[in-house]
Image: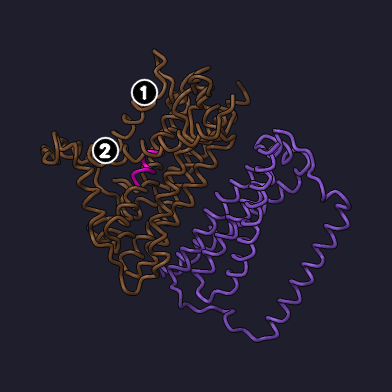
Chain colours: A brown, B purple
Amino acid sequence: MTEVWWVSLIKAFVIINLLMLTFAYMTLIERKVLARMQLRYGPNRAGPFGLLQPIADLVKLIRKEAFFPASAVDVLYITAPVLSCFTALAAFSVIPFGPGWTIGDYYVSGEVVNVSISLILLFALGSLGIYGFIVGGWASDSKYSLLGSMRTCAQMVSYEVSLTFAVLGVVLMGRSLSLVDIVHKQDETFWFFGPQFVGLLIFFVAGVAETNRPPFDLPEADTELVAGYHTEYSGMRFGLFQMGEYVNMITLSALAVTLFFGGWYGPWAPLGPLWFALKLFAVIFIFLWLRATLPRLRYDQLMRLGWKVLLPLATVNAVVTAALVVAL
Amino acid sequence: MILADAGNILVWIVWVVAAFACLGSGIAVISFSNPFYSALSLIGNLASLAVLYLLLAAEFVAAAQVLVYAGAVMVMFLFVIAYLGGHADAPWAGGPSWQALWAVAASAALLVEVIVVIGLKTGGRLSHSPPTDFSFGSPATIGRLFLTDHLLAFEITSIVLLIAAVGGVILGSHSRETAAE
């Protein structure tokens, strides 16, 4: 049951475009949801219900002048957004979205690549993605950008630890680092959000912080830092940074679905990718909901939460799970 | 058969690119005068090492290398360098020339040593690759080796890390007290 190489290539092409389409429409959904939660209409001019708004935004971003500061380090300044966007898109490739199908004579697997260490690969790509933010902020040669990238760096490194520790429980219960195996295991036994409820909570809080989403959006706190590390960016370079952030959020939501909510399996009816998409949008909606509901944390509160609450909790969770897995 | 040959050529190309990237970034680390660029080159060096691990069928080691060294550790380097600024005091910049001489001599000695050891240890085994089965380099295999053959080294490493963590806490709390005074 191996895939022909050109089937993999076509699938990768389709998935990456679906991912970018999801990103484009997520910006619209975000603005719509925020607007409705604040008793406004949101974008409703471009096309019916504002459905063409993402395309209008894209055209605007591409046509804008892509200036950069005279003292910026140009090679790094230009590579940084590309790097953060690339790692974000690449990380999604290990997320399984279906059981795999046989179409005609060809087998199509339910993920872009299936490696035995997909979870570590995903985190590794995520940790490389941080460089896009740091290098971009540093290369801009601007105070706000540098301060923003320092904050991004400190926050993402702190919460990455809790994020990784939070999934240890799932790895122990699934007895594998492969996301496909973990999903199969959940189908055989039960979805892990029940026994790993603490893990899910930590994962979600750390995930919101890791993607710099409100209420943890200190790296780009607009009242303090203008826009954080991307202050000096404009046009499509700014667009790439935005894309990296949103795709990271999609990947993290997909990871939550895969690790805690049974991936592509549904409670009934084998719909495969449809279940996956449905759960994915439910998790993304919670991200947006948080943004509309909660005010931003203070910086010391953020650090205290990360190191003194989430990390010990995640460690205890991992140890208790390990003991229970061995005992039962 | 043609496909297998194409695969071998691809592996060979990747190996050449990764090996030269490794050497090039290594030289770049010590030749840049701006520490920020040196740190970036070190990230490139660690990443190309990870590619070499991948070619040796050690996926887990490669991913861990990227996650821990290229990811977490180097972020700290960049953080500090960016915070202090590129023009901060660089203690070794423009040191006396005998230092450079000694460095070259020492690294040449190391190189000779490595070549001699590899030559003596492997004998004629370098010309063909050893058989590796599917579980080679998998997390389960590595974990088992840690807890059986290399238990002592594993435990000593964990103690060293614990000491480092305690030291970090003590240093941090000390500086906080002096700041409060």
Given residues B67 and B150, the one toward you in this image is B67
Q: Does residue A199 appear to the left or right of A141 in the view shown?
A: right
Q: Position of residue B93 (x, y in %)?
A: 57, 80
Q: Position of residue B121 (x, y in %)?
A: 87, 54
Q: Does residue A221 appear to the left or right of B22 in the view shown?
A: left
- Give the main secondary structure of the magenta stretch: helix
Q: Which mark is residue B21?
A: none
Q: Is residue A99 above or below residue A25?
A: above
Q: Which mark is residue A274?
A: 1
Q: Position of residue A230 (x, y in %)?
A: 31, 59
Same subunit: marks 2 and 1: yes
How far apart are labels 2 and 1 at the CA level?
17 Å
When asked about the image quadrant of residue A263, the answer is top left
Query: Which chain's residue wears label 2?
Result: A
Residue underneath mark 2: A25
When asked about the image quadrant of residue A68, the answer is bottom left
Q: Is residue A130 above or below residue A72?
A: above
Mark 1 neighbour density, 10 Å: few (under 14) some (14–19) many (20 or more) = some
When asked about the image quadrant of residue A28, the answer is top left
Q: Is A243 part of what is drawn in magenta?
A: no
Q: Position of residue A311 (x, y in %)?
A: 47, 44
Residue type pointed to by label 1:
Leu
